[in-house]
Amino acid sequence: MMTDFLDADMLGAVAGFVSTLSFLPQVLKVWRTRSTRGISTGMYALYCFSLLLWGSYAWLIESWPLLVTEIATGLMTGYILVMSIKGFDDDD
Amino acid sequence: MMTDFLDADMLGAVAGFVSTLSFLPQVLKVWRTRSTRGISTGMYALYCFSLLLWGSYAWLIESWPLLVTEIATGLMTGYILVMSIKGFDDDD
């Protein structure tokens, strides 16, 4: 069975690391350019809310890779949301 | 136990729906403004890659809410990635 070959938790941890890491270039771009111009505030507000839900889901199913992912991602998306709300050189 | 009160799969489905929905405002903003100026291409490339990993993880643990989420999110983030690569009014 494929599961024997691939360890699901390891894959979950790698997936979590990559999805969390993916926000870093956006954080750095906002930090470097001091601009949130093209970024949708609505997206990051909804995304942060979904992370709260995903964190609860992870807690209920006791999936620690997922829980760690949501917390770390929340720190980054929270930064982008705050900067976007502050409206640095924004257009909406 | 709290699990009796909250059905994890239901919570996962709602979380999945909200996180997928969260990309809609960004898709609409790119569509409306024809600009991906503040958007990090690196973020969406990594994010799309992580969705492939999360999809495999969801398949392995047979979590269908998570799998449906990754596919739907992939369609939206894929659109933003393509637009960002095309560099509509972009600055990096």
Image: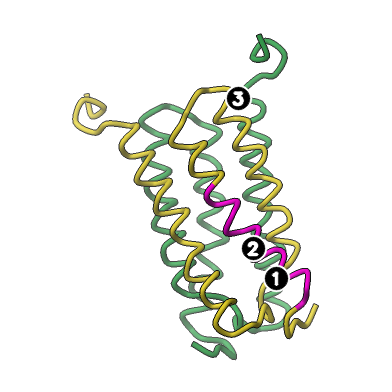
Chain colours: A green, B yellow
Question: Is the residue under label 2 in contact with that under label 1 (CB below 8 Å)?
Answer: yes
Q: Which residue is mark 1?
A: B83
Magenta residues span B72-87
Closer to the eye: label 2 or 3: 2
Tag 3, which secondary structure? helix
**Spot occupied by residue B73 in the image (x, y as percentages of width and height):** 54, 52
Tell me the chain of label 3.
A
Q: Residues within 10 Å of mark 2 (few under 14, many from 20)?
A: some
The CA distance from mark 2 to mark 3 is 29 Å
Q: Toward which corner of the image does residue B39 lie, by quadrant? A: bottom right
Label drawn at residue A9: 3
Q: Amino acid at mark 3?
A: Asp
Q: Which residue is mark 2?
A: B79
Tag 1, which secondary structure? helix
Q: Residues within 10 Å of mark 1 (few under 14, many from 20)?
A: many
The verdict on residue A46 being magenta is no
Callout 1 and callout 2 share a chain: yes
**Spot occupied by residue B62 in the image (x, y as percentages of width and height):** 50, 23
